Amino acid sequence: MSMSKKRIENHIQDLRAFTATPGNGVTRLTYSKEDLQAREYIKEQMEEYGLFVREDGIGNIFGKLEGTLKDGPSVIVGSHFDSVPNGGAYDGTAGVVVGLEVAALFKENNITPKYPLEIIAMIEEESSRFSGLMGSRGIVGSIDEADFKNQKDRDGISVTEAMSNAGLDASKPVYRDPSTMKAFLEMHIEQGPLLEESNVPIGVVQSIVGLTQLEVTIKGIAGHAGTTPMDRRSDALITATTIISKLPQFAIDEGDGTVTTVGRVQVSPNGANVIPDNVYFTVDIRSGKAEKVLNVVNKVKELVASYNGNGIQTSVEQSLYIEPKALNPAIRSLLAEVSDDLDVPHSTMKSGAGHDAMVLSDVTDVGLILVPSKDGISHSPDEFTSTEDLARGATVLYEAAKKLTEE
C-alpha cells in the first residue's frame, strides 16, 4: 500500500495546484484555465498507466485498458474533477485519483482483463458554472440539447462558447450506449462525520438522496435609496429575502431528513444606494423520498408566485430533478465482500450528497463507497481525508474492479 499512498498523495497535491484561488481553496470551474490544466494532467497520467485516452463532446475524459473479450462492455471507475468555488482538494478529485490508482495497480500487477477497464474524469458535477451532474447526464442522454445550448454562466457565457474557448470539440458524441458499460464504481469522501465518528474506514452506499435545483428570479423596480419612500418601493431584494426566510420551515415540516439550501444569490444592479430591481437565487432541495422533494418544490412555487403584484414579477425554473436512487445490490455485496477479504471494516449507509453514480445507475450497475472526511467538513478549504483512507478505498475498488473485469 505504500506505493499507492505515495502516488495518491502526489496526485492530490498536483491537482490542488490547478485553482483560480491560490491560498483560498480549490476553485476549478468547468472549461476554465484551471480545468484545462487539470485535464492535461489527468490525460498524461492515464497515458502513463497504459490507457488509451479520449474525450467526448462535453469534455468527459476516458482512459481505457482493452480487455481480451472483443467489444466487451467496460468496468468504469472514477468521479468528477470540477470544484465548488473555494472548495477543498478532495471532493470529486479524490475519486478521479483513486481511479488513476486502480489503473496503476492493474499495470503494476501486469493484469490484462477479460472485460475492458475504463477510468473516467467527469465534468460539472457541482453546478458551479452550469447545470449540475452535466457530465454523467450527458453520458446517459438526459440533457435536452436546446436547454444545454441555452445555458449561460454568471458572466453570460454560454456552454458552447465556453467549450469553444477551451478548445474542446463539441462535435464528438456524448451519449454512450448502455451496452458498452458493464458497471460503474465510484469512491467519494463522505462529506459528513459518521464514518470518522464511528471509526469505520469504508461506507458502502445503499442509496442516494433525490434532489432538485430551482432557479428563482424576482423582478422589481430600481430607485434611488434616498428619494423613494418606503411605501412606494418594489424592492426585489426585500421580496427575495422574505421568500428565502420561509424555505427552511418547508424542509422541517416535511421531515425525514429533507433539506433546503439557497446557495447562490445575484443582486442587480448591486449598488449601495440603489433599490435592487432584479434578484436571482437558487434553491437546492434534497430528501431520501421523492414525494418529499416534490412537496417542497410545489410549496416553493406557490410561495414565489404569491408575491406577484405591486411592481414585483416572479418566476421559477426547475433546472434539475433526480429521483432517489437505490444502488445495485450485487455490486454492494461485492464491495462488502471485498472489504471483508481485506479485513477493512465497513458499514452500510445512505448518501445525503448527490453523485454521478446516481445518474449512471439508470443505465448500468453502480457501486459507491465513501471514505471518512475529517470533522465532516466539505466544500471548504479545510476539507481533508487522509492518504491512508484514500489508499484503502483504492484497494477496495481495485479488488472489486479486478473481479468485475474477470467474470
Image (cartoon, helix red, strand yellow):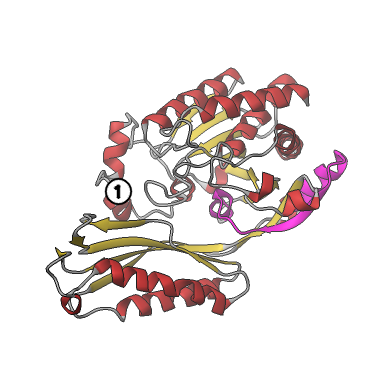
Horizontal side, residue 402 vs residue 176: left or right: right
Which region of the structure is painted magenta?
332-361
Residue at image coords 56%, 46%:
179
Figure check: 365 above or below 53 = below
Q: In the rendered view of the protein, which quadrant contains the C terminus?
A: top right
Q: Secondary structure at mark 1?
A: loop
Residue at image coords 64%, 45%:
189
Is 325 magenta? The answer is no
Number of callouts: 1
Looking at this view, is 152 or 134 the one in front? Answer: 152
Residue 52: % across, % down: 54, 24
Q: Give amino acid for label 1.
A: Arg
Residue at image coords 20%, 64%:
277
Q: In the rendered view of the protein, which quadrant contains the N terminus?
A: top right
Residue at image coords 58%, 33%:
119
Looking at this view, is 93 or 43 the one in front? Answer: 93
Residue picked out by circle 1:
154
Could you tell me if residue 309 is visible in this image? yes
Could you tell me if residue 116 is visible in this image? no
Residue 151: % across, % down: 30, 51
Horizontal side, residue 317 vs residue 195: left or right: left
